[in-house]
Image: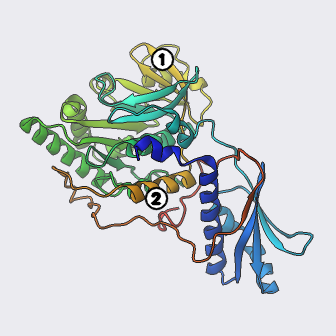
Amino acid sequence: MSEKETWQKMDKEERLRHQLEVQSRQIERVFSTHQVAARVAGGQVETQSIRFDLQSHLESGIHRLRGLKQDLLSVLGVTDVSLAKDEQGQWRLDIVRPHEPPVALLDLLPLLPELPESTAVLGIDEDGSPLLLPFADPNMTHVLVAGTTDSGKTSLLRTIAVSLAMTNRQSKLQLLVIDPDRPGKQNRQLAPLMFLPHLLSQVIPEPEEGLSALQILVDEMHHRLKHETVRPTIVSLIDNVEALVAFAADDVLASLAALLQRGAEAGIHLVLGTSQPAADWLSSVMRTNLPLRLVGQVQDEADSLAATAVPAAEAEMLLGQGDFLAVIDDTQVHFQAAFIGNYDLHLTLATIHRNRPRPLLAQPLQLNLVGEVKPEEEPIVWQRQQEPPPWDVVDEEPDEERSDDNELMDDIAEDED
């Protein structure tokens, strides 16, 4: 089965049922944690809401559920839940369905032809045409992704990583993800990427380890240039790059400059995410070597000019939530970024691991300082102990889960928010 056929099979109904199964397990985990003898028996999906039918033999236990609202909100990543009895006296839990994303990655990908190697999916432009990012193109070797909180910057980084993993074999393309901690950051959208077999290490959260990884990439670049090799392609995505610069400006900037100047010759590409496009550390030399700019909503006109290098680009007027400009030289393309929510991501991870062995690399990059993903590590895949509940899907084209503020599903990474 081809890559395209694999992802075409993941239609909306399959994805919705997978979401319901995961949500049922999340709800039951809250029950178990609070020692409430209740389980999800089934339910109904409607246009605006989802109903979970509960089974419990302990009336007192059901009353205790009323005190679990905050835990349920947190686990499910929704804004409200309600618990009540229906006309038959059966207890049920109702949640509001979030709005469908304008462009869901798993809806877009099956519509595309076979993609060239090392090509990421970005979204859809104003004409409804897919927008792609071929790293092999000399005009797109390295990328700056700029935007404020809620611009969709981190979601776009996640989309780039996942789309690359969905359409490239691990032996042909590797990923390195650096996501430095920042004060007050509640959601780590990049953390689940650690389960992609393409990752060279765990997602790196500490600036010190991020610097070490950059220095190892520089060493790898020199090795490849000396031996005239470019395989496998390495794409390093760094969110909040200013946190790395603040940690050790001279060393970080030296490594970034080296990789931006000659990394593409060795098959190494950088995608830098920042909320501070006008910062002094983004020197003219660095900007010159970031030919593609993906710019979401920014603070003001000065940030817009710094991010796009185009006067009157008006990036400060963008709407946020994935509303972006792609800029190369003086050319601008307005597009809506593709989005992959937590439930779609979990299904994607399970599918990748189910269909792909973990091949050995001819020249694996050793990230000993930051921890290497061992080949024997397996992803966490949910299998219910009982038969899946009967779900009655009312609408033919149900909304998909979307919430940029969702906490990571406990079953993906229990130690995350």
Q: Quadrant of residue 391?
A: bottom right
Above-or-below relation of 337 to 334: below
Nearer to me, 197 or 32:
197
Would residue 112 appear left or right of 14 to someone viewing this image? left
Q: Quadrant of residue 242?
A: top left
Single out the residue that lies furthest toward the right.
87
* Secondary structure category for the residue under label 1: strand
Amino acid type, mark 1: Gln
**Within 10 angstroms of label 1, few (less than 14), some, or many (20 or more) residues?**
some
Residue 357 locus on image (x, y percent): 32, 58
Nearer to me, 126 or 88:
88
Above-or-below relation of 163 to 369: above
3D distance between C-alphas at marks 2 and 1: 37 Å
Q: Given this view, does label 2 or label 1 mark the residue nearer the observer?
A: 2
Single out the residue that lies furthest toward the front.
1
According to the image, what is the colour scheme of the structure?
rainbow
Residue 385 locus on image (x, y percent): 57, 77
Identified at 41% across, 43% down, the residue is 3
Q: Is residue 198 visible?
A: yes
Residue at which label 1 appears: 332
Would residue 215 appear left or right of 394 to someone viewing this image? left
* Secondary structure category for the residue under label 2: helix
Nearer to me, 8 or 134:
8
Q: Is residue 64 visible?
A: no
Q: Earlier in the sequence, mark 2 or mark 1?
A: 1
Above-or-below relation of 50 to 299: below
Residue at which label 2 appears: 350
Identified at 59% across, 59% down, the residue is 18
Amino acid type, mark 2: Ala
Instruction: Tell me the number on the disc at residue 173.
Output: none
**Within 10 angstroms of label 2, few (less than 14), some, or many (20 or more) residues?**
some
Would residue 188 appear left or right of 244 to someone viewing this image? right
